């Protein structure tokens, strides 16, 4: 019987089979109802940041309903009646074309530039139900392109802590200069490493026992006893009477 060519000495061996692909991630492992967006840079390093809308989509592209959006540490304008306007809730009101319906944070200047300035801006976004985020985008606001975000990080809340799921630093050319215009869609590429924080971390090792105290130095040898006194001299002999 003739041996197959890969069994002959010196013949080229066949390529190894590639490993099987990783199983798909269960949705419940990547789902969350709390997300945090931290914006760290704008198009021209402006002291303020603004957006018209924030839009989240699920893994199948379905819109995700955002129940609330807040901007802790942010500062918004006040109108003539004394009401606070352009709050973070405007990001989720569905209005993509009304200049009065945008979000603005005036505390974006570098820390120390003003009282309360943070050098960044944080948005806390809560969905109406836990969901796996598939993609997201923003809509530019009505004016002042200097305020358009170009750098940020996005985290989800899982197992009692925030875990980063996306970081972006866009060149200004990728942010639309036209107003009331969506950013390019940002896709979330999930991997198994993203779900590891959901498992309890390894408990810390117990502390090492304290070291024993150093040994005491040896005691000096006892001093030798003082020499005995010499015996008394014998008495002189008595004289004869």
Image (spheres, rainbow, N blue to C red):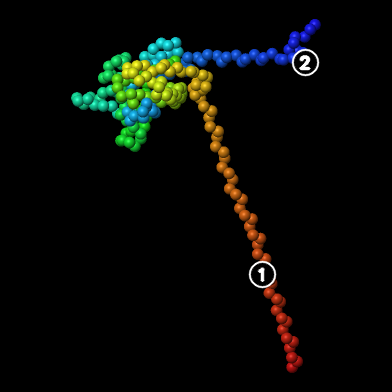
Residue 44: name its quadrant: top left
For label 1, the crowd category at 10 Å Cα-Cα, with few meaning under 14, some 14 to 19 and many 20 or more, is few
Question: Which percent across, then down, holds residue 158?
Answer: 45, 22
Q: Earlier in the sequence, mark 2 or mark 1?
A: 2
Tally of marks: 2
Helix or strand or loop: what does disc 2 sit on? Answer: loop
Q: Residue at x 80, y 6 (%)?
A: 1
Left of 86 or right of it: where is 156?
right
Badge 2 crowding class, 10 Å Cα cut-off, few under 14, some 14 to 19, many 20 or more, is few
Q: Position of residue 121 (x, y in %)?
A: 36, 28
Separation of residues labelled 2 and 1 (CA atoms): 96 Å
Asked where in the image residue 87 lies, by quadrant, the reply is: top left
Answer whether residue 52 is visible to the viewer in this image: no
Q: Mark 1 = which residue?
A: 226
Q: Residue at x 75, y 9 (%)?
A: 4
The residue tagged 2 is: 9
The residue positioned farthest toward the top in the image shown = 1
Q: 11 or 187, which lies in front?
A: 11
At 72% across and 84% down in the image, what residue appears?
235
- In the rendered image, residue 146, in percent from the top left (x then y), is placed at 34, 26
Q: Mark on residue 40?
A: none
Which quarter shows the C terminus? bottom right
Q: Secondary structure at mark 1?
A: loop
Q: Position of residue 33 (x, y in %)?
A: 40, 18
């Amino acid at each position: 019987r003739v041996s197959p060519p890969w069994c002959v000495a010196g013949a080229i061996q066949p390529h190894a089979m590639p490993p099987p692909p990783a199983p798909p991630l269960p949705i419940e492992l990547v789902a969350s109802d709390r997300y945090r967006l931290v914006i760290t840079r704008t198009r021209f390093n402006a002291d303020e940041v603004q957006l018209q809308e924030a839009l989240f989509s699920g893994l199948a592209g379905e819109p995700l309903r955002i129940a609330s959006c807040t901007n802790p540490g942010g500062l918004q304008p006040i109108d003539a009646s004394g009401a606070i306007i352009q709050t973070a809730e405007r990001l989720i009101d569905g209005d993509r074309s009304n200049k009065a319906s945008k979000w603005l944070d005036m505390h974006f200047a570098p820390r120390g530039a003003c009282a309360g300035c943070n050098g960044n801006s944080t948005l806390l976004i809560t969905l109406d139900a836990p969901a796996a985020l598939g993609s997201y985008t923003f809509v530019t606001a009505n004016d002042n392109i200097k305020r358009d975000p170009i750098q940020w990080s996005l985290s989800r809340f899982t197992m009692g802590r925030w875990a980063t799921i996306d970081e972006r630093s866009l060149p200004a050319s990728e942010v639309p200069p036209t107003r009331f215009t969506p950013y390019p869609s940002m896709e979330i590429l999930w991997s198994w490493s993203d779900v590891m924080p959901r498992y309890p971390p390894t408990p810390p090792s117990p502390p090492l026992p304290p070291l024993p105290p150093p040994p005491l130095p040896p005691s000096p040898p006892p001093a030798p006893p003082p020499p005995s006194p010499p015996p008394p001299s014998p008495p002189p002999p008595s004289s004869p009477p």
